[in-house]
């Protein structure tokens, strides 16, 4: 077996020697350095790999020919062998060309190439592995940067438009998977906990994305994580060891579906404690009311602090020592769950302008309306987060892919790339672009 394989692969090895020798001759007069050596070797290895890949297809799969007639999978009638057709694919080593048998059904008027099916190929002009690499990179980087990265690392040229098509196709797969998941969870209640109840933190916010027609639309972003997954990396700073991100361009009511399924995927069960952290925006509260109406609410402390600071600025002047001292005192009271004292202090301030009075009224209304979610001393004692830093980080992660200079989207493209981004961030790429099977049957 080994001798047969060595003989079959010998043309690829000869190609390697030929390319390497030519590179050596070309560079000998210029002088060798490690850079030239590495590039020459990469060029030779790629040429050998391209040749070897075609030989492996022939060795393990043949051409897909299995006689002059085959049964049609559509009408069960005969399919006629019409000859061989060439196909060109871009692999992670470069362009490969191979031939495969072509069958045609006169009744269905459809053609079929068995070898493409055996190789598990899509309609894209890239190999499965390169499609996965493009999908992964496009989940992190813009299409143009993906093309540049592949050229820099692999020395292969991929058109930006090909990157876009492959990425959006992968994103559409991700979106379809999400919707199947939502449908399966929609009518399902949370499973009863078969363990000690856990505490889960759910956070929600939005990220505005620019579109080609000049509008800005909001992509809803949610983060779900178990409290025990929140580790203190340094005093006052925490990192999440594990979390589930969900994002979708839709209304608050529509977002409840994917958020609910994400909660179940994360592991939330009936009987667990749920803590919902947000800034108090109506849309976010609507989502919480739909997915976890009994959740304990926590108003983002830093959002509240901004409002209190705004009152200090209109009274004492922004940046003044008096403003800083007064604001610090109020935030300390807020941390100690002394909201009534904060409200009284704000109400008793002497203000000199109508604008300042209006600011105070707005802040007082906000604090009064949300006071049920500001028991920060209790939250601190329980070890719960006081701020929505996790979802703000999630918004930044989504925005890093969707926002940026010159990035303007069409709605289908935005939805696909957001779904792809979420799949990559949640380490779910294997479900969408599984790694090709490494074990291949030998052709008869």
Image (spheres, grey):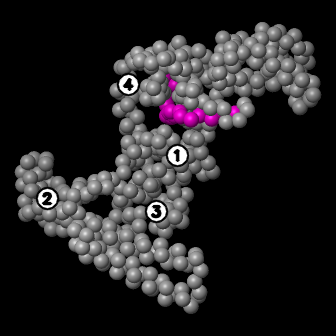
Picture coordinates of residue 274, whole percent (x, y):
54, 18
Of badges 2 and 4, the one in the foreground is: 4
| Pointer 1 or 3: first along the chain | 3
Picture coordinates of residue 343, whole percent (x, y):
79, 11
Q: Circle 4 — which element?
A: helix
Q: Which residue is mark 2?
A: 104
User: Over which residues does the magenta segment extend?
Assistant: 237-254
Q: Which residue is mark 4?
A: 185
Q: Residue at x 89, y 17 (%)?
A: 351
Picture coordinates of residue 142, whole percent (x, y):
54, 53
Q: Are marks 1 and 3 in contact (CB under 8 Å)?
A: no
Q: Residue at x 69, y 33 (%)?
A: 237
Q: Between 183 and 378, which is closer to the camera in this rendering?
A: 378
Q: Which mark is residue 353?
A: none
| Pointer 3 or 4: first along the chain | 3
Q: Residue at x 15, y 68 (%)?
A: 83
Q: Which residue is mark 1?
A: 409
Q: Is residue 290 left or right of residue 306?
A: left
| Pointer 4 or 1: first along the chain | 4
Which quadrant holds the C terminus?
bottom left
């Amino acid at each position: 077996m080994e001798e047969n394989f060595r003989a079959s692969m010998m043309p690829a090895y000869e190609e390697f020697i030929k390319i390497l020798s030519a590179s050596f001759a070309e560079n000998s007069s210029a002088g060798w350095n490690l850079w030239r050596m590495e590039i020459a070797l990469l060029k030779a290895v790629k040429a050998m790999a391209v040749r070897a890949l075609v030989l492996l297809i022939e060795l393990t799969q043949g051409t897909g020919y299995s006689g002059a007639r085959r049964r049609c999978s559509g009408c069960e009638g005969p399919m006629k062998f019409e000859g061989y057709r060439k196909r060109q694919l871009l692999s992670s080593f470069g362009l490969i060309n191979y031939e495969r048998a072509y069958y045609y059904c006169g009744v269905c008027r459809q053609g079929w190439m068995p070898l493409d099916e055996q190789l598990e190929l899509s309609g894209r002009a890239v190999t499965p592995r390169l499609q996965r690499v493009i999908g992964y990179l496009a989940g992190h980087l813009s299409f143009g940067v993906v093309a540049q990265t592949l050229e820099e690392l692999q020395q292969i040229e991929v058109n930006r438009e090909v990157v876009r098509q492959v990425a959006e196709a992968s994103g559409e797969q991700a979106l379809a998977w999400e919707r199947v998941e939502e449908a399966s969870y929609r009518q399902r209640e949370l499973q009863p906990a078969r363990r000690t109840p856990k505490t889960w933190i759910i956070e929600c916010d939005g990220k505005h994305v620019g579109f080609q027609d000049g509008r800005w639309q909001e992509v809803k972003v949610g983060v779900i994580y178990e409290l025990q997954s929140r580790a203190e990396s340094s005093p006052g700073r925490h990192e999440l060891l594990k979390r589930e991100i969900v994002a979708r361009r839709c209304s608050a009511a529509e977002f409840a579906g994917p958020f609910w399924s994400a909660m179940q995927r994360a592991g939330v069960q009936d009987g667990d404690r749920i803590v919902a952290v947000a800034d108090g925006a109506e849309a976010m509260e609507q989502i919480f009311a739909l997915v976890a109406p009994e959740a304990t609410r926590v108003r983002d402390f830093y959002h509240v602090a901004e409002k209190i600071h705004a009152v200090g600025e209109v009274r004492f002047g922004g940046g003044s020592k008096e403003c800083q001292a007064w604001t610090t005192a109020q935030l300390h009271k807020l941390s100690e769950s002394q909201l009534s004292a904060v409200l009284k202090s704000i109400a008793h301030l002497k203000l000199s302008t109508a604008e300042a009075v209006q600011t105070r009224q707005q802040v007082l209304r906000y604090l009064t309306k949300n006071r049920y979610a500001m028991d920060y001393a209790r939250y601190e004692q329980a070890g719960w987060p006081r701020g929505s830093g996790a979802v703000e980080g999630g918004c930044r992660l989504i925005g890093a892919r969707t926002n940026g200079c010159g990035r303007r989207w069409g709605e289908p493209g935005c939805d696909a790339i957001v779904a792809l981004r979420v799949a990559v961030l949640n380490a779910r790429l294997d479900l969408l672009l599984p790694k090709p099977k490494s074990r291949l049957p030998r052709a008869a």
